[in-house]
Image: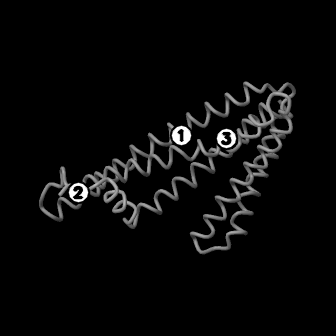
Amino acid sequence: MEESFIDRLQAVLRAPDTGPTMRRFFVNTIFDSTFVILGILIASAFGTDPDFRIITTTIITSTVALGISTGVSVYEAETMEQKLRMREMERAMLRSLEDTRIERISQLTIILIAGVNFTAPLLAGLATLAPFFILGDGGIRDAAIISVGLAMLILFIVGAMMGRSGGRNPWKQGARMTIAGIGAFIICYWIESLL
């Protein structure tokens, strides 16, 4: 009897390495994406002549590009790792695992991890873009301030998730990530004011 997609997906999610790998890549990518968005906001929304179309288009194209870049790079890296694991198992079992349940689960693992990584920048982009689309062209400054606040909230939530998963105080870890975001904002705002 052929194994269903749901059965394979459950097997992937039960594997001991899948959850930590997805979490690690997701946290890293959403963290990086949020910092990129902060840089975009500082350069385009807090500049002397903010333009709604430039701000929104830059955030959209940057998050899509980051999603594709990180999704593809993680796909390639995980493909290499999974092939190495498969070779080790084949050597230990003295047989090929081509077209087996193990290979199908391995392929689904790669797709799932890369897919999660692809979505991280898009989520950060959607959250930080929302104020601009709600307030429109006339509320760029207010939208930018709210967007920065949402970026800090994303950093706090991601930090708290990391703290909870790692057995540390989630409030402290969330605060540390937020402080890093505030520090980056201040430094980048200062750089923008010099140019």
* Residue in the foreground of this view, choosing between 17 and 143: 143
Q: Residue 187 appears in which quarter of the rendering?
A: top right
Tell me how far mark 3 sits from mark 2, CA to CA. Answer: 40 Å
Amino acid carrying label 2: it is Arg
Q: Which mark is residue 36?
A: 3
Q: Position of residue 183 (x, y in %)?
A: 78, 51
Is 97 situated left or right of 191 in this image? left
Amino acid carrying label 1: it is Gly
Say if 103 sits above or below 160 in the image: above
Q: Earlier in the sequence, mark 1 or mark 2?
A: 1
Q: Earlier in the sequence, mark 3 or mark 1?
A: 3
- Residue marked by disc 1: 67
- Residue marked by disc 2: 101
Is 86 situated left or right of 159 in this image? left
Residue at horizontal 67%, vertical 30%? 58
Tell me the mark number nearer the camera, choosing from 3 and 1. 1
